[in-house]
Amino acid sequence: MTSGTLFSEDVSKARSLIRITNRDCDMKKAADALENMSADGDSEAQYLYGLLLFTGTCVQEDRKAAAELLGLSAAAGNAPASVAGSEIAKDPEGSRLLELMGLRLRGERGDTEACRKLFDIYEKGEPPANKNHVEAVRWYTVCAEEDDAAAQSVIGFMYLMGKGVKKDRDAAVHWLKKAAVAGNPDAMLHLAEMYDAGLCNTAPDPTEAIKWYQAASGAGNADAQYRLAGMHMMQKTRHHDEKKAVYYLEMAAANGHEEAQYQLGMALAYGSGVKRDPARAAEMLEASCRSGYQQAMVDYANMRFEGDVIPKDYSKAAEWFQKAADSCNGYAQYALACMYSNGYHFAPDDSMAAKYFREAAEMGEVNSQYALATFYHEGRGVEKNLKESILWFDQAADQGHLGAKAFLGMMLITGDGAERDVEEGIKRLKESADGGYFEGQYYLGKLYAEGGIVKKDMHMAKKYLSLAARQGDRDAIELLEKIRAGKSR
């Protein structure tokens, strides 16, 4: 709020004179009145007259005087003047600044086209303006009050979410319903979301949510169609209806909704709620992939790689793993690395495998951390580096990877690539063995059989070696046979 004279009767008259919708609009008369009120210290008049001075509208352009007046107005608490003053301070002579101040003046005159532009500028933070949701709401409210349904929907959503204004359920419903009645599907969707999620202190009401989702769906909103599918899929609710769920999923998919295309593709692939149709499943999943949905890329690529539910196609698998990997999907990077490592679709290339293992490992993908560690341990695709190896084994072990724990344990016991730490090494090895990893069981059984590093214990040796042998570990089988042969003699 500004000082006591803000929106005084005289300023209101001056504002009326500058409104483009006023038949009696008289900018020269308004400028004279605002000049006099500014001199008398009226902060609102100082703000408006400052805009006239800065743009040279009906007065001689004087940017310095404009900046001084806006500063006085801001000091008195006028928020718009404070915003305008800070913009002027950045670049007083900038051409884009003059354009912005011109838009502000047009906005104050009730020009809805200027107000739409100002909303975009402050919502996005386009220079020389900073992002400012309060200003964005202020300008777009002008459009909403002129029955712009798109603006009403946005302003209602702002009140619903508390963006640029305090959360206000009544204001949100007021603007959203006005827009919805005018046929705005986004407003219908926001009303549905309000009742669905219980936003802004609204009691969740699935029936009311479905009503508004259906309205938005009928207006062609794909998000509403997808949400309806989800609500009808929910088990153990009175709205559960598999046929309706598929109906809305089909509708949303046809309207290009990437998640709906994915969900429908997966349902068709596995026959979940619909008749199994691998060809159409592939069509839907590819459509979702082309829309940029990463989960679709990864799952569809996996299906093409495995060939269990959709015909095997390594070329398609590589294509979509690559697209997902380019978007920093750790699993896709891991899958590409495996394809290069094992020669699926690509010629075997350990250096490319190491490249993608590293990218995925740095994203936190645990299997890639383990694989990269083994590559450094063996010098495969990279120069052998035991310190790097133990670093990545440690990363994977911390995420619970049993193989990494086994290798890390042995490296710590032997001091291979790290400072020797037998106690920590045994601990890691035991975690791996007790977790069911055959190599951890073999290594630990071997240590108990040999003694030295740990106290010799043939009972414990046989226990862990037997566990590894049952998983088919040849080294464990061979060592067990030697132990038994030695005992029988």
Image (cartoon, helix red, strand yellow):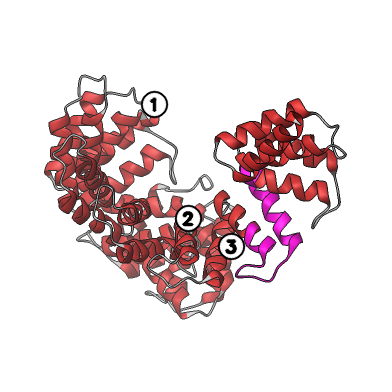
Q: Mark on residue 358?
A: 3
Mark toward the start of the polypeptide (1 vs 3):
1
Query: Any magenta on residue 399?
Result: yes
Drawn side of residue 74 relative to residue 127, left or right: right
- Mark nearest the camera among 1 and 2 is 1
Mark 3 crowdedness (10 Å alpha carbons): few <14, some 14-19, many ≥20: many
* 3D distance between C-alphas at marks 1 and 3: 47 Å
Q: Which residue is mark 1?
A: 201
**Residue depicted at 16% across the width and 52% down the height:** 280
Asked if residue 411 shows in the view, the reply is yes
Q: Nearer the viewer, mark 3 or mark 2?
A: 3
Give the quarter of the image for residue 28: bottom left
Q: Are marks 3 and 2 in contact (CB under 8 Å)?
A: no
Direction front: furthest residue: 489
Residue 67, located in which quarter of the rendered image? bottom right
Whole-percent x, y for residue 33 in the image: 40, 62
| Marked residue nearer the N-terminal end (3 or 2) | 2
Asked if residue 383 lies left or right of residue 269, the reply is: right
Q: Nearer the viewer, mark 1 or mark 3?
A: 3
Q: Find the magenta span and give its range.
A: 374-403
Q: Which mark is residue 132?
A: 2
Q: Position of residue 479 (x, y in %)?
A: 69, 40
Point out residue 171 in the picture as x, y percentages from the top left corner.
Answer: 33, 35
